């Protein structure tokens, strides 16, 4: 699948929660879009990603 | 032909010049602004040119004040900006700077939201003054903006924003500005906006700590209606503070993004 524009071979059938864990990102500090549709936080455990999905993840850091 | 003098339409003779009109209308004006630019030499006037006449040291009449405040704007900008309503979530280092820049633009309406009070450590980057210490930030911002551009309409909410109230609070604004400090709140507001109010642009920020390079701070357009400002790397943490210059760089990236969106520029 493609994550933030980069082709990544990260395994099929992962949930978003599992993907975030693999990428070391906190699920409370991210915005996730899959194939141009926003995925809400409550669905991170259920939504399963497959090969060919286009994933955008924005991770926020503190300060402002 | 018709021109605008201090933003009021007036008819002048064909062949009139800027200094000629000044001599007729306000002979003692020593600052002549022509289409947003101070001119030192006379200019021939054409249809719909905008002249603003200012005398240094003089407090303008209330009826002229609004036009004079924005006379150095690019022509046409103020009319559009005056129709806009912008919501700012957080009035700290980012929010206070953004609110003031938008106020100086003559934005039509600001909805300012923060639950906190001004404390002394804020002053190294937030737009408050020593006299505001202890005051609610919403009240202090109202005070500041009333002295910068009194024609900006301000609504304030002294509340803590969370996913249970974000949509209700911001449902009537044209553009939402995320100006929080806490990264979880940033993610919450962006998630709520993109899922529940996807037509509204959200201008958010991530990464502006320290005194790292200016050039690392960028504006990116992501996910169609999200505009993300910052270096995305330098977070505030022990040993890495937040200071006026870099925070204000990020804040003004956000403010200019808001301006561009109001003027129809969706790209960065």
Image: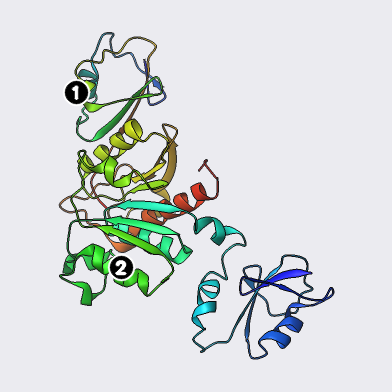
* Residue drawn where x is 78% and y is 67% of the image: B46
A62, B112: nearer the viewer: B112
Q: Is residue B246 visible?
A: no
Residue A60 x, y percent position in the rendering: 27, 39
In the figure, A15 relative to B225: above or below?
above
In the figure, A18 relative to B120: above or below?
above
Residue wearing tag 1: A21
Position of B171 with respect to B164 (left or right) is right
In the figure, B156 relative to A45: above or below?
below
Position of B257 with respect to B246 (left or right) is right
Residue B170 x, y percent position in the rendering: 32, 46
* Residue drawn where x is 28% and y is 64% of the image: B126
Looking at the rendered structure, whether the residues under marks 2 and 1 are on a common chain is answered as no
Residue B13 x, y percent position in the rendering: 82, 76
* Residue drawn where x is 26% and y is 74% of the image: B129
The chain that hosts pointer 1 is A
Tell me the quarter of the image containing the N terminus of chain B. bottom right
A48, B6: nearer the viewer: B6
Q: Can you tell which quarter of the image residue B198 is in?
A: top left
Residue B88 x, y percent position in the rendering: 33, 53
A47, A19: nearer the viewer: A47
Position of B189 with respect to B21 (left or right) is left
Residue wearing tag 2: B142
Between the residue at mark 2 and the residue at mark 1, the CA separation in whole angstroms equals: 44 Å
Q: Which of marks 2 and 1 is in front?
A: 2
In the figure, B263 relative to A22: above or below?
below
Q: Can residue B76 be seen in this view?
A: yes
Q: Can you tell which quarter of the image residue B210 is in?
A: bottom left
B154, B201: nearer the viewer: B154
């Amino acid at each position: 699948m493609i994550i933030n524009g980069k082709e990544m071979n990260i395994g099929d059938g992962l949930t978003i929660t599992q993907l975030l864990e693999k990428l070391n990102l906190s699920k409370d500090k991210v915005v996730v879009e899959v194939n141009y549709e926003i995925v809400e936080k409550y669905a991170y455990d259920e939504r399963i990603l497959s090969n060919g999905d286009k994933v955008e993840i924005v991770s926020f850091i503190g300060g402002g | 032909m018709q021109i605008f003098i201090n933003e009021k339409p007036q008819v002048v003779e064909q062949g009139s010049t800027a200094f000629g009109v000044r001599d007729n209308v306000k002979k003692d004006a020593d600052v002549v602004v022509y289409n947003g630019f101070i001119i030192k030499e006379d200019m021939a006037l054409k249809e719909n040119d905008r002249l603003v006449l200012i005398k240094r040291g003089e407090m303008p009449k209330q009826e002229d004040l609004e036009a004079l405040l924005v006379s150095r704007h690019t022509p046409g900008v103020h009319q559009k900006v005056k129709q806009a309503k912008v919501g700012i979530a957080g009035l700290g280092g980012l929010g206070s700077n953004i609110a003031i820049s938008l106020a100086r633009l003559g934005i039509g309406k600001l909805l300012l939201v923060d639950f906190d009070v001004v404390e002394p450590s804020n002053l190294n980057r937030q737009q408050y003054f020593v006299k505001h210490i202890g005051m609610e930030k919403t009240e202090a911002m109202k005070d500041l903006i009333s002295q910068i551009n009194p024609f900006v309409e301000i609504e304030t909410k002294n509340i803590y924003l969370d996913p249970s109230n974000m949509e209700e609070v911001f449902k009537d604004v044209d553009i939402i500005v995320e100006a929080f400090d806490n990264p979880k709140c940033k993610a919450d507001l962006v998630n709520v906006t993109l899922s529940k109010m996807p037509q509204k642009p959200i201008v958010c920020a991530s990464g502006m700590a320290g005194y790292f390079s200016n050039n690392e701070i960028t504006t990116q357009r992501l996910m169609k209606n999200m505009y993300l400002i910052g270096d995305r790397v330098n977070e505030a943490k022990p040993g890495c503070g937040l200071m006026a210059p870099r925070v204000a760089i990020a804040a003004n990236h956000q403010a200019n993004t808001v301006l561009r969106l109001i003027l129809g520029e969706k790209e960065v």
